């Protein structure tokens, strides 16, 4: 089986809709950044790797991939080029020929690429992959002509104006990348849709095209709560127990189902770990605590009498006598004793959360809090479902957090102030 000559991984976005979390493609699952999962799978089907990154995280990417095989080049997206089209134009002097373009924020089964690698390298051809979805997804949709031929890609149509129920995945194959970069350069638009307009222009030409329908799992990190869905997919790959000899697990503790422990993990008396679950290096799970279907990062202290259920907990997080349900806590965040995340509406309706000024239906019946890096929640406070707390925030004791809190904010007696100790 041959390999595709080049793969271009798009990681240049600013992750604004991911707030209060940052760097989607670098977000860690089971102790490893998302982009490394992609690279490991794509190595089976592609030869040469290029990552387009944002200027703020280019150095992190370079350090992450240095000394890896195959060699991976990191290109910084030029500031004068915006969006997906800008990322592609940024590599026009570094990349040519047969190229696969993928999104760094997506997780899917790349065995679908065998549909390309099992045949000789096509010439003058573009190939797209789409997934049939009954529910609305804010992405690009395939439009077909009267001969059932792919004719256009409609970006983010209104839910009741979708041209089909097939969403375009960012898995785009070009037998010659120069054809794409040339077409993008020819597009004239005032909107940030140069890539979609270029696709439409190519589809209107005589350029040969094809598409395959993908039926496997697919999760995109678009909003912060998508971390929980992606975590569930990745943890489903944990098939057996793995507890290194350096760990200290009390004989009175219970471990049920497939779990992975890092080095030097300690689990106290009468604690219970229910898999699939992951606990990172040097973390401690105190007496009488319960961890269910969750990932815990490195150097964490999950103090006694905690319950962490279906949640993602970052590195160096401290908890004590808390309930953390269906929530995401970023690195170095902290919950005082008795603080909890509410994760269910009494009317059983799906939970809403704001993205900028827009209320978004998460589609989730259970969703707790999203807590940014280095934020601290005081004792006996409660966070309403779907609320997001920014980075470097302080929540005073006994607060009820009903609305999102901006970065560097101190919430006390329901009043928001500037946090003077970020």
Image: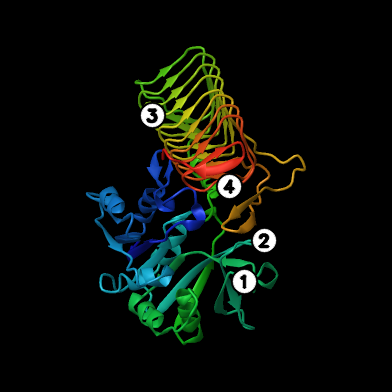
Q: Given contact means CB atoms under 8 Å apart, are the residues at marks 4 and 3 in contact? A: no
Give me the disc on residue 299: 3
Q: Determine which quarter of the picture holds residue 310.
A: top right
Image-based side of 245 in relation to 412, left or right: left
Distance in Å between CA atoms under marks 1 and 4? 28 Å
- Location of the C terminus by quadrant is top left
Q: Which residue appears at 48% of the width and 73% of the height?
A: 192
Q: Specify the farthest residue to the bottom.
A: 206
Q: Name the residue that disc number 4 marks.
A: 404
Within 10 angstroms of label 2, few (less than 14), some, or many (20 or more) residues?
Answer: few
Helix, strand or loop at label 4? It is loop
Q: Can residue 118 be seen in this view?
A: no
Q: Where is residue 26 in the image (x, y as percent from the top left)?
A: 39, 49
The residue nearer to you, when weighing 137 against 276, is 137
Q: Distance between the residues labelled 4 and 3?
A: 28 Å
Residue 188 in view, yes or no: yes
Q: At numbered mark 3, what does the secondary structure look like: helix, strand or loop?
A: loop
Q: Name the residue under label 1.
A: 157
Task: Answer with mark 1 or mark 3, whichever residue precedes in sequence.
Answer: 1
Q: What residue sits right under mark 2 in the picture?
A: 134
Quadrant containing the N terminus in the rendered view: bottom left
Badge 3: few (under 14), some or many (20 or more) residues near its Cα, within 10 Å? Answer: many
Q: Which mark sits nearer the N-terminus, 4 or 3? A: 3
Indicate which label's residue lies in the foreground, 1 or 4: 4
């Amino acid at each position: 089986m041959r390999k595709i000559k080049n793969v271009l991984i798009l990681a240049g976005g600013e992750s604004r809709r991911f707030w209060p979390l940052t760097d989607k493609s670098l977000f860690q699952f089971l102790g490893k950044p998302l982009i490394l999962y992609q690279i490991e799978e794509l190595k089976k089907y592609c030869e040469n790797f290029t990552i387009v990154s944002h200027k703020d995280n280019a150095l992190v990417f370079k350090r992450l991939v240095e000394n890896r095989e195959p060699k991976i080049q990191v290109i910084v997206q030029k500031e004068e080029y915006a969006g997906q089209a800008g990322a592609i134009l940024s590599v026009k002097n570094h990349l040519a020929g047969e190229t696969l373009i993928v999104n760094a924020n997506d997780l899917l089964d790349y065995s679908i690429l065998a549909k390309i690698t099992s045949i000789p390298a096509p010439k003058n051809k573009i190939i797209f992959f789409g997934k049939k979805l009954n529910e609305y997804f804010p992405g690009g949709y395939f439009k077909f002509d009267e001969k059932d031929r792919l004719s256009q890609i409609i970006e983010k149509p209104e839910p009741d104006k979708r041209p089909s129920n097939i969403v375009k995945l960012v898995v785009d194959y070009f037998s010659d990348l120069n054809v794409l970069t040339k077409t993008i350069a020819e597009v004239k638009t005032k909107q940030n849709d140069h890539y979609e307009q270029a696709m439409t222009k190519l589809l209107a030409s005589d350029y040969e095209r094809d598409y395959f329908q993908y039926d496997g799992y697919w999760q995109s990190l678009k909003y912060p709560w998508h971390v929980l869905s992606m975590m569930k997919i990745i943890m489903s790959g944990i098939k057996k127990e793995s507890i290194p000899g350096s760990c200290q697990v009390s004989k009175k503790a219970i471990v049920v189902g497939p779990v992975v422990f890092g080095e030097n993990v300690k689990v106290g008396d009468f604690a219970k770990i229910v898999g699939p679950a992951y606990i990172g290096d040097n973390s401690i799970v105190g007496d009488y605590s319960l961890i269910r279907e969750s990932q815990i990062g490195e150097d964490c202290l999950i103090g006694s009498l905690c319950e962490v259920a279906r949640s993602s907990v970052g590195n160096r997080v401290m908890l004590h006598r808390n309930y953390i349900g269906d929530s995401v806590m970023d690195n170095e965040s902290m919950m005082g004793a008795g603080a909890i995340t509410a994760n269910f509406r009494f009317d059983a309706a799906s939970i809403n959360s704001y993205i900028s000024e827009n209320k978004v239906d998460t589609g989730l019946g259970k969703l707790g809090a999203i807590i940014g890096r280095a934020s601290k929640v005081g004792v006996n406070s409660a966070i309403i479902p779907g609320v997001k707390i920014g980075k470097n925030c302080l929540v005073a004791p006994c607060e009820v957090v009903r609305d999102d809190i901006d970065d560097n904010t101190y919430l006390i007696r329901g009043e928001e102030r500037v946090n003077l100790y970020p």
